[in-house]
Protein backbone atom coordinates (compact mmCIF):
# COMPACT_ATOMS: atom_id res chain seq x y z
CA UNK A 1 0.00 0.00 0.00
CA UNK A 2 2.85 2.38 0.83
CA UNK A 3 4.46 1.70 -2.57
CA UNK A 4 1.20 2.65 -4.32
CA UNK A 5 0.96 5.87 -2.29
CA UNK A 6 4.55 6.79 -3.20
CA UNK A 7 3.91 5.97 -6.85
CA UNK A 8 0.72 8.06 -6.86
CA UNK A 9 2.56 10.99 -5.25
CA UNK A 10 5.41 10.78 -7.77
CA UNK A 11 2.95 10.53 -10.65
CA UNK A 12 0.95 13.55 -9.41
CA UNK A 13 4.16 15.56 -9.05
CA UNK A 14 5.27 14.63 -12.59
CA UNK A 15 1.88 15.69 -13.95
CA UNK A 16 2.30 19.11 -12.32
CA UNK A 17 5.80 19.66 -13.71
CA UNK A 18 5.68 22.53 -16.21
CA UNK A 19 6.21 21.97 -19.90
CA UNK A 20 8.26 24.71 -21.55
CA UNK A 21 7.92 26.11 -25.04
CA UNK A 22 11.38 25.83 -26.62
CA UNK A 23 12.97 26.91 -29.87
CA UNK A 24 16.20 26.69 -31.78
CA UNK A 25 18.68 29.17 -30.22
CA UNK A 26 18.88 31.09 -33.51
CA UNK A 27 15.24 32.16 -33.29
CA UNK A 28 15.18 35.88 -32.56
CA UNK A 29 12.06 35.74 -30.38
CA UNK A 30 12.12 35.59 -26.58
CA UNK A 31 8.36 35.87 -25.98
CA UNK A 32 5.29 35.19 -28.06
CA UNK A 33 1.54 35.55 -27.53
CA UNK A 34 -0.59 32.51 -26.68
CA UNK A 35 -2.62 33.13 -29.86
CA UNK A 36 0.53 33.05 -32.00
CA UNK A 37 1.70 29.82 -30.31
CA UNK A 38 -1.70 28.25 -30.88
CA UNK A 39 -1.62 29.30 -34.53
CA UNK A 40 1.90 27.90 -34.97
CA UNK A 41 1.00 24.53 -33.41
CA UNK A 42 -2.24 24.41 -35.42
CA UNK A 43 0.01 24.95 -38.49
CA UNK A 44 -1.88 28.12 -39.49
CA UNK A 45 1.12 30.40 -38.84
CA UNK A 46 4.28 29.18 -40.53
CA UNK A 47 6.71 31.93 -39.60
CA UNK A 48 8.17 33.45 -36.46
CA UNK A 49 7.40 37.14 -35.88
CA UNK A 50 10.81 38.03 -37.40
CA UNK A 51 9.91 36.19 -40.64
CA UNK A 52 11.97 33.04 -40.03
CA UNK A 53 10.25 29.85 -41.19
CA UNK A 54 8.92 27.82 -38.27
CA UNK A 55 9.44 24.05 -38.07
CA UNK A 56 7.02 22.62 -35.51
CA UNK A 57 7.84 19.41 -33.63
CA UNK A 58 5.36 17.52 -31.43
CA UNK A 59 5.47 14.33 -29.39
CA UNK A 60 3.36 11.39 -30.48
CA UNK A 61 -0.35 11.32 -29.79
CA UNK A 62 -1.09 10.07 -26.29
CA UNK A 63 2.31 11.05 -24.87
CA UNK A 64 1.65 12.57 -21.40
CA UNK A 65 3.94 15.58 -22.03
CA UNK A 66 2.13 16.30 -25.32
CA UNK A 67 -1.21 16.19 -23.54
CA UNK A 68 0.01 18.47 -20.73
CA UNK A 69 1.47 20.97 -23.19
CA UNK A 70 -1.64 21.15 -25.36
CA UNK A 71 -4.03 21.40 -22.42
CA UNK A 72 -1.90 23.64 -20.21
CA UNK A 73 -0.18 25.94 -22.70
CA UNK A 74 -2.51 25.98 -25.71
CA UNK A 75 -5.79 25.73 -23.77
CA UNK A 76 -7.00 23.03 -26.14
CA UNK A 77 -7.45 19.29 -26.22
CA UNK A 78 -5.05 17.08 -28.18
CA UNK A 79 -7.85 15.73 -30.36
CA UNK A 80 -8.77 19.30 -31.41
CA UNK A 81 -5.22 19.90 -32.57
CA UNK A 82 -5.18 16.58 -34.42
CA UNK A 83 -8.44 17.51 -36.19
CA UNK A 84 -6.93 20.80 -37.35
CA UNK A 85 -3.88 18.98 -38.74
CA UNK A 86 -5.99 16.32 -40.44
CA UNK A 87 -8.25 18.95 -42.00
CA UNK A 88 -5.29 20.88 -43.41
CA UNK A 89 -3.59 17.75 -44.79
CA UNK A 90 -6.71 16.20 -46.32
CA UNK A 91 -7.85 19.49 -47.88
CA UNK A 92 -4.41 20.06 -49.37
CA UNK A 93 -4.08 23.46 -47.68
CA UNK A 94 -1.42 22.60 -45.13
CA UNK A 95 0.65 20.01 -43.39
CA UNK A 96 0.98 18.41 -40.00
CA UNK A 97 3.89 19.05 -37.65
CA UNK A 98 6.92 16.77 -37.45
CA UNK A 99 6.34 14.00 -34.89
CA UNK A 100 9.04 12.74 -32.57
CA UNK A 101 8.96 9.73 -30.29
CA UNK A 102 10.62 11.07 -27.15
CA UNK A 103 11.71 14.22 -25.37
CA UNK A 104 15.34 13.32 -26.11
CA UNK A 105 14.53 13.27 -29.82
CA UNK A 106 12.52 16.50 -29.47
CA UNK A 107 15.52 18.15 -27.79
CA UNK A 108 17.89 17.03 -30.55
CA UNK A 109 15.59 18.09 -33.40
CA UNK A 110 14.83 21.53 -31.90
CA UNK A 111 18.50 22.13 -31.07
CA UNK A 112 19.69 21.30 -34.60
CA UNK A 113 16.87 22.59 -36.84
CA UNK A 114 16.86 26.33 -37.65
CA UNK A 115 13.47 27.88 -36.82
CA UNK A 116 12.41 24.84 -34.79
CA UNK A 117 9.67 25.04 -32.16
CA UNK A 118 8.72 22.37 -29.63
CA UNK A 119 8.23 21.73 -25.93
CA UNK A 120 10.16 19.99 -23.16
CA UNK A 121 10.07 19.39 -19.43
CA UNK A 122 12.80 20.89 -17.22
CA UNK A 123 15.06 17.83 -17.23
CA UNK A 124 15.64 18.22 -21.00
CA UNK A 125 16.49 21.93 -20.96
CA UNK A 126 20.03 23.13 -21.60
CA UNK A 127 21.92 25.80 -23.54
CA UNK A 128 21.23 24.05 -26.85
CA UNK A 129 17.57 25.17 -26.80
CA UNK A 130 15.97 28.49 -25.99
CA UNK A 131 12.94 28.83 -23.71
CA UNK A 132 10.25 31.07 -25.24
CA UNK A 133 7.90 32.86 -22.84
CA UNK A 134 4.20 32.69 -23.65
CA UNK A 135 2.50 36.04 -23.00
Image (cartoon, rainbow, N blue to C red):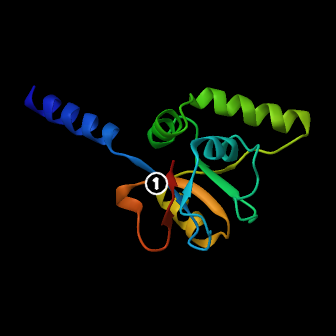
Q: Is residue 84 above or below residue 128?
A: above
Q: Is residue 126 above or below residue 60?
A: below
Q: Which residue is mark 1?
A: 120
Q: How many marks?
A: 1
**Residue drawn 70% across the image and 40% down it:** 42
**Residue drawn 36% across the image and 56% down it:** 122
Determine crowd level at label 1: few under 14, some 14-19, many 20+ residues with C-alpha closer than 10 A. Answer: many
Where is residue 57 drawn, in percent x and y?
63, 53
Where is residue 48 drawn, in percent x and y?
70, 59
Residue 90 falls in image quadrant:
top right
Quadrant of image for the N terminus: top left
Q: Is residue 46 above or below residue 86?
A: below
Where is residue 95 drawn, in percent x and y?
80, 45
**Residue drawn 76% across the image and 53% down it:** 46
Q: Nearer the viewer, residue 103 or 68?
A: 68
Secondary element at tag 1 = strand
Residue lying at the far left of the rendered structure: 2
Left or right: where 48 falls relative to 91: left
Q: Is residue 100 above or below residue 94?
A: below
Residue 2 falls in image quadrant:
top left
Left or right: where 88 falls relative to 63: right
Left or right: where 133 falls relative to 12: right
Where is residue 96 drawn, in percent x and y?
75, 44
Q: Nearer the viewer, residue 107 or 7?
A: 107
Amino acid sequence: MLAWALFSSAQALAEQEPVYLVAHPGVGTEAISRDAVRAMFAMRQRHWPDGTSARVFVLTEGHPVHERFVKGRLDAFPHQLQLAWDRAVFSGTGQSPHRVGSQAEMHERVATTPGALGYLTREYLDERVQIIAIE
